[in-house]
Amino acid sequence: MVPIDDSTHYLSFVIAYIRGILDLSDETDCEALLEAARQRGLRLFRFKRRHLPRVAQVIGMLKGLQPSDLLDVGTGRGSFLWPFLDQFPWVPVTCVENHPIRCRDLESTAKGGIDQISVRSVDVQQGHFDEQAHDIVTALEVLEHLPRPFPAVENLVKTARRYIVASVPSKPDDNPEHIHFFEPKMFESLFMSAGAQRVDLTWVPGHMIALVKVY
């Protein structure tokens, strides 16, 4: 069995998730919690430390921006969220996710002790987003999945106070869930047409990342 410790996984988030999902809020012994997770067959791979170039690039951008709060659209299993919280443990994060199981898992991690996470179960293409409600907005590996990306981008631009960071695949692939491929000009135009002030594009292997200045 692969060891689970802070060198292999984001251990504080693992422990919070186990506490929350198994309703063991009074349990403080790490080994007891990990054993309870093994007995229940909980899958903890989502918390594994991995080097993803796109995530490293985005976190580098955010270090320059120093967000006061973050709205993360399409959080999923947390490939970006856990490294972000590891680097920015003081920043409150609102996770937007409409997959019920992923919402449950994020809410369980918050319940288990990571209280800077809050979760909104909403479709970014049509949900209500308050104007300038969040300092920085991230949408990583999201827009290529959406049938209607432009309304989603309009919501991102509406709710960001300063910047949006968004990433998409940089070349076509065979993932059937990727229903759009964005050329650079098209990707830039998507945000400019929604009212953004400037879009700067960068690339890492397999992905294109937009740093979007809103105001």
Image (cartoon, grey):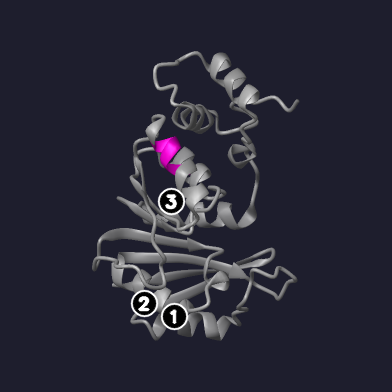
Q: Amino acid at mark 2?
A: Glu
Cα gap from disc 2 to disc 3, whole angstroms:
25 Å
Q: Which quarter of the figure is the C terminus placed in?
A: bottom left
Q: Earlier in the sequence, mark 2 or mark 3?
A: 3
Name above or below for residue 179 compared with residue 24.
below
Instruction: Please tell me whether mark 3 sits on a helix, a strand or a loop.
Output: helix
Majority secondary structure in the magenta region: helix
Task: Kindly identify the residue that appears in the image at 57 percent across and 72 percent down.
Answer: 144
Q: Amino acid at mark 3?
A: Lys
Q: Position of residue 38 (x, y in %)?
A: 64, 24
Q: Amino acid at mark 1?
A: Phe
Q: Position of residue 165 (x, y in %)?
A: 45, 64
Is 55 left or right of 132, judged from the image as shown? Answer: right
Instruction: Please tell me whether mark 1 sits on a helix, a strand or a loop.
Output: helix
Q: Which mark is residue 63?
A: 3
Q: Which residue is mark 1?
A: 150
Q: Residue 65 or 137: which is nearer the viewer?
A: 137
Q: Which residue is mark 2?
A: 154
Tags 2 and 3 touching, CB below 8 Å: no
